[in-house]
Image (cartoon, helix red, strand yellow):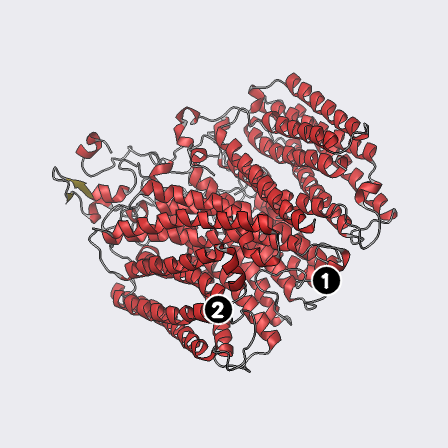
């Protein structure tokens, strides 16, 4: 957690109650996002049957996955519209998890060969 | 500390000079919403540990039995994933309906979300039963233990979400889920979407990547 | 974990809103005196006191275990404990001291002080706070019930696989360990969410983040560490539980499992845990030193940023606990580097503490002695810690008494010293009477001598090769003399805590006599202190502040309400403590209402734990209590409009009121998670 992330008072204009995300995104837009997510999922499934192997398969799958993840977080969970402290807290946890577990796994795999 | 404040000398706070009920929080967010996000950040570490355990053991069937990836039914799981994604859509529609004060419509979407969640859980139960029939039980090998633990934890999370959604529907039926409770619905929604994004990770990392 | 997930099961009050009998089960508790007021309390001060008292009780238990260890090792071929019993005793000593003593002592201070230091009336979620305490108590009882139910855990507090499997530890001891620590984990997690929200959201007007006292900052960092570390332990414990109870294959080596999986998960949790234990002490010492040096804390931003740096870097050093486990040269090199680096922010803190005292008007009161003692002892422990970062040396030190010496210097000499000093410092604030200063100094010197006699020789023993966790040693290895010294030292430590208890008892009796049956009250601001908690009367009134303070002078707000600098830069007193400190006599402040539900929910937990071990039906009963309790909790309004004179309602910021219904009469809704 950086000090910056814990600096809500630097944004005094946010000292108001926040509107719900409904005020920012129309229902139609939500439906569009959901269709996009469904298409992305379909693409993932298609890729897994496409016969690609190794990095050529894993890399695009991971990219699409991250894209879906971020889209849900930004729009459905309204991180895009809420005060930045929520984004910082959540992504700090997420990035921390990815970092420590990636390090631990590489330690385990390097040893296990 | 400015000179001006210094010049005032000791602070003698006059009545009325303070705000006892201090209506806004420092971040502008309600405690409940901030707490939910803090909790979800912590959940990342929990699921991270379980996903890592699965990744470590996914090819380990030294004690016999099939590996999870040898018996996955990808088309079936894909449909489950669509169901859960759709439930995220119905959840945001519920939140925005209740925020607009459309209580009846919000209730319909909440009930739909809970229903889709139940479909997902039923699918998971069916999947687990199939795997056990095909010879991969919880204790069969390290990979199966890791698979059932990870997806089982996710399933428990979904189940809790369903309980919350059903509770909201019941409240709504009793006319207690008006616009003033929109944030409650929003916070339950945050939890629901989080469960959904965890599934986005699991579906790709556990099911699709060989 | 499972429990907190249902937390957001937050329902509006439903029909229970106006009724004094939510769900028709319990009348709303209203007592303010007697045991029932403690059982139902949601007051952060009472909860803090309960954390402290419970931790002291477990400290006695853990201390007895320590004395048993030392008596066993006083002479070669000790006969007091069998090898099996010795394993149980050292496992329980470590687990108790870490999870049931140092962590809850920190939690006690944080609960009591943080709302006061930020000028709030309570924490963000008062009922969740109470629930956290009861969970912690439930966990402690489940863990210690293993002594009575056959066999205590015997795998060491780190519980390495595969030694912790059923094959090598066939009794239920480790299952008790698992259950107990899962419950204390729930307590830590709910506490973390609560205090983070409190600090981020509920500061008094004018208190920006960089006007918060160092203790509050260290609390915030600690709680973030808990927030992210506890789930890692929880995940690992679930794996171990599934292995032991349901036959999963996570740590079954014959099924090709990797024992290092546990080691990694445990230490990913375990090293942040080290900072979770020490950072609250860093914060406390940063409160005590400036007051008794009559100087502001030196380098406040450095103190804050080094604390944050420790909190971040603490995540990148865990594998230095595993240098001897064969993690490979790349990992060893990387983690050696990071371990050396983390000494830097810690060193910054030590230098800043010394610079705080430098040139100050130092008053050697009892709390100050403990604070200075901590700086010295922690530095010794920190230096021996850096030697572990040198991995070739570390392979020699691993599993010897050198390691035992190191972590007792940082945890006992670091954390516990300050907590005892904190008792002397905050006792009048909390209980309204003083502990004898002379008694405190006597206590300190006995403790200081005993501590160094106990743990100092362990450096030598360790370097000579005496292994830890072994129940005896043979003669003629050169271990006899220093082991005997160490045992005598341990007895002296025991005596020092008898002095502390005597000091508390004598002080209480004297205060009772002087007050002639009236309430105990200490004079305002007895130490000429600097931060907001001393703005309130002693002991702190139930509503904390008569008026929520507005921060005008920044850090050391209270001090600059009493003093200001003249043209020559000298401090001139402009107001007496009596003028500045509040009387605490307001009676119309709105506070959160007490509740039975937190203890009801926590009451179900031990039965879930015991049930999973012995009989799943019992677990179902416990689980039903938990679920019903959560629904009762969610349906109960967090505020009770038929309360007593301290009319509840506005103690917490209106969390739902913004939506426009704040003025509506149906406003006694349950706050979401609290």
Q: In 3D space, how far apart are the residues under numbered discs 1 and 2 (Cα atoms)? A: 44 Å
For mark 1, give the secondary structure: loop
Q: Is residue C93 visible?
A: yes
Is residue A113 left or right of B134 when viewed as pictured?
Answer: left
Residue indicated by mark 1: C615
Q: Which of the marked residues, 1 or 2, is nearer the chain's N terminus?
A: 2
For mark 2, give the secondary structure: helix
Quadrant of the rendered image containing residue C550: top left
Q: Is residue C505 visible?
A: no
Number of numbered markers: 2
Circles 1 and 2: CB atoms closer than 8 Å: no
Which residue occupies 47% across, 51% down?
C276
Which residue occupies 34% across, 59% down?
C376
Query: Closest to the observer: B153 or C568?
Result: C568
Residue sitting farthest toward the left: C568
Q: Point out residue A48 in the picture as x, y percentages from the top left corner.
A: 78, 30
Local packing at callout 2 (Cα closer than 10 Å; few below 14, some 14-19, many 20+) is many
Residue B195, labelled with which disc?
none
Residue sitting farthest toward the right: B134
On the same chain, marks 1 and 2? The answer is yes
Residue indicated by mark 2: C462
Q: Point out residue B53 in the picture as x, y percentages from the top left corner.
A: 68, 47
Query: Closest to the observer: C256 or C1?
Result: C256
Q: In the figure, B11 relative to C185: above or below?
A: above
Chain of residue at mark 2: C
Local packing at callout 1 (Cα closer than 10 Å; few below 14, some 14-19, many 20+) is few
Query: Closest to the observer: C483 or B188?
Result: C483
* Residue depth check, mark 1 versus mark 2: number of the one nearer the observer: 2
Query: Closest to the observer: C106 or A48?
Result: A48
């Amino acid at each position: 957690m950086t000090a910056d992330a814990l600096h809500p008072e630097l944004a005094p204009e946010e000292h108001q109650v926040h509107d719900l995300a409904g005020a920012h995104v129309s229902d139609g837009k939500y439906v569009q996002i959901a269709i996009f997510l469904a298409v992305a999922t379909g693409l993932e499934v298609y890729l897994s049957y496409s016969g690609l192997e190794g990095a050529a398969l894993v890399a695009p799958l991971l990219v699409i996955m991250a894209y879906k993840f971020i889209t849900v977080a930004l729009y459905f969970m309204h991180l895009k519209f809420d005060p930045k402290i929520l984004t910082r807290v959540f992504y700090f946890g997420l990035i921390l998890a990815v970092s420590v577990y990636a390090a631990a796994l590489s330690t385990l795999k390097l040893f296990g060969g | 500390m400015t000179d001006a404040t210094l010049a005032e000398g000791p602070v003698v706070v006059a009545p009325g000079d303070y705000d006892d009920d201090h209506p806004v929080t420092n971040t502008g967010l309600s405690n409940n919403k901030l707490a939910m996000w803090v909790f979800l950040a912590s959940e990342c570490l929990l699921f991270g540990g379980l996903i890592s355990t699965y990744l470590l053991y996914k090819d380990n069937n030294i004690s016999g039995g099939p590996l999870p990836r040898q018996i996955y039914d990808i088309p079936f799981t894909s449909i489950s994933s669509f169901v859960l994604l759709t439930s995220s859509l119905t959840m945001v529609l519920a939140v925005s309906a209740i925020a607009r004060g459309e209580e009846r419509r919000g209730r319909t979407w909440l009930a739909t979300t809970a229903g889709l969640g139940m479909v997902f859980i039923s699918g998971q139960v069916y999947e687990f039963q199939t795997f056990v029939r095909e010879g991969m039980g919880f204790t069969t090998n390290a990979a199966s233990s890791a698979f059932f633990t990870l997806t089982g934890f996710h399933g428990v999370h979904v189940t809790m979400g369903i309980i919350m959604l059903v509770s909201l529907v019941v409240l709504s039926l009793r006319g207690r889920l008006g616009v003033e409770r929109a944030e409650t619905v929003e916070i339950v929604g945050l939890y629901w979407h989080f469960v959904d994004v965890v599934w986005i990770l699991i579906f790709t990392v556990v099911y699709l990547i060989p | 974990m499972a429990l907190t997930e249902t937390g957001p099961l937050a329902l509006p009050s439903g029909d229970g809103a106006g009724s004094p009998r939510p769900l028709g089960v319990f009348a709303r508790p209203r007592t303010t005196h007697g045991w029932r007021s403690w059982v139902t309390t949601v007051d952060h001060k009472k909860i803090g006191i309960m954390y402290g008292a419970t931790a002291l009780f477990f400290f006695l238990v853990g201390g007895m275990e320590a004395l048993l260890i030392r008596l066993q090792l006083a002479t070669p071929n000790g006969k007091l404990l069998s090898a099996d019993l010795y394993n149980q005793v050292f496992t329980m000593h470590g687990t108790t001291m870490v999870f049931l003593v140092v962590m809850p002592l920190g939690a006690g201070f944080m609960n009591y002080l943080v709302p006061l230091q930020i000028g709030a009336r309570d924490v963000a979620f008062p009922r969740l706070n109470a629930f956290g305490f009861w969970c912690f108590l439930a966990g402690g009882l489940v863990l210690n019930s293993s002594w009575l139910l056959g066999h205590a855990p015997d795998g060491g507090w780190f519980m390495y696989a595969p030694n912790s499997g059923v094959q090598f530890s066939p009794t239920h001891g480790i299952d008790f360990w698992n259950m107990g620590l899962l419950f204390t984990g729930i307590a830590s997690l709910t506490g973390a969410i609560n205090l983070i929200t409190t600090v981020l959201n509920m500061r008094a007007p004018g208190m920006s983040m960089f006007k918060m006292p160092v203790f509050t900052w260290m609390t915030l960092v600690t709680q973030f560490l808990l927030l992210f570390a506890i789930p890692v332990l929880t995940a690992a414990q679930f794996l171990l539980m599934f292995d032991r109870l349901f036959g999963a294959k996570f740590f079954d080596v014959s099924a090709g499992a990797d024992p290092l999986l546990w080691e990694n998960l445990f230490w990913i949790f375990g090293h942040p845990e080290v900072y979770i234990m020490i950072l609250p002490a860093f914060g406390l010492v940063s409160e005590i030193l400036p007051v008794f040096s009559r100087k502001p804390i030196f380098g406040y931003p450095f103190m804050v940023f080094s604390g944050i740096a420790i909190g971040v870097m603490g995540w990148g050093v865990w594998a230095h606990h595993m240098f001897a486990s064969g993690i490979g040269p790349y990992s060893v090199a990387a983690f050696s580097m990071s371990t050396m680096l983390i000494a830097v922010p810690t060193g910054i803190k030590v230098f800043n503490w010394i610079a705080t005292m430098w040139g100050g008007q130092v008053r050697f009161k009892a709390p100050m002695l403990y604070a200075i003692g901590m700086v010295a002892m922690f530095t010794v422990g920190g230096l021996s810690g850096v030697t572990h970062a040198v991995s070739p040396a570390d392979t020699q030190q691993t599993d010897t008494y050198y390691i035992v010496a190191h972590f007792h210097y940082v945890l006992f000499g670091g954390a516990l010293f300050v907590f005892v000093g904190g008792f002397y410092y905050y006792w009048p604030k909390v209980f309204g009477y003083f502990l004898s200063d002379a008694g405190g100094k006597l206590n300190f010197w006995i403790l200081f001598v005993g501590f160094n006699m106990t743990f100092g020789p362990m450096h030598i023993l360790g370097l000579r090769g005496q292994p830890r966790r072994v129940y005896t040693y043979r003669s003629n290895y050169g271990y006899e003399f220093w082991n005997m010294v160490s045992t005598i030292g341990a007895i002296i430590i025991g005596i020092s805590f008898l002095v502390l208890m005597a000091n508390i008892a004598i002080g209480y009796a004297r205060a009772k006599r002087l007050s002639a049956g009236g309430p105990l009250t200490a004079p305002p601001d007895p130490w000429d202190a600097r931060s907001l908690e001393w703005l309130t009367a002693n002991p702190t009134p139930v509503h904390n502040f008569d008026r929520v303070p507005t921060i005008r002078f920044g850090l050391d707000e209270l001090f600059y309400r009493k003093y200001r600098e003249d043209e020559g830069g000298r401090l001139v007193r402009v107001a007496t403590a009596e003028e500045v400190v509040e009387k605490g006599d307001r009676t119309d402040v709105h506070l959160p209402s007490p509740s039975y539900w937190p203890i009801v929910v926590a009451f179900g937990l031990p039965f879930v734990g015991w049930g999973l071990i012995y009989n799943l039906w019992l677990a179902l009963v416990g689980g039903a209590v938990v679920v019903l309790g959560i629904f009762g909790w969610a349906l109960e309004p967090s505020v009770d409009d038929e309360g007593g004179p301290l009319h509840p309602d506005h103690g917490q910021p209106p969390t739902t009121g913004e939506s426009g219904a704040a003025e509506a009469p149906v406003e006694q809704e349950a706050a979401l998670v609290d």
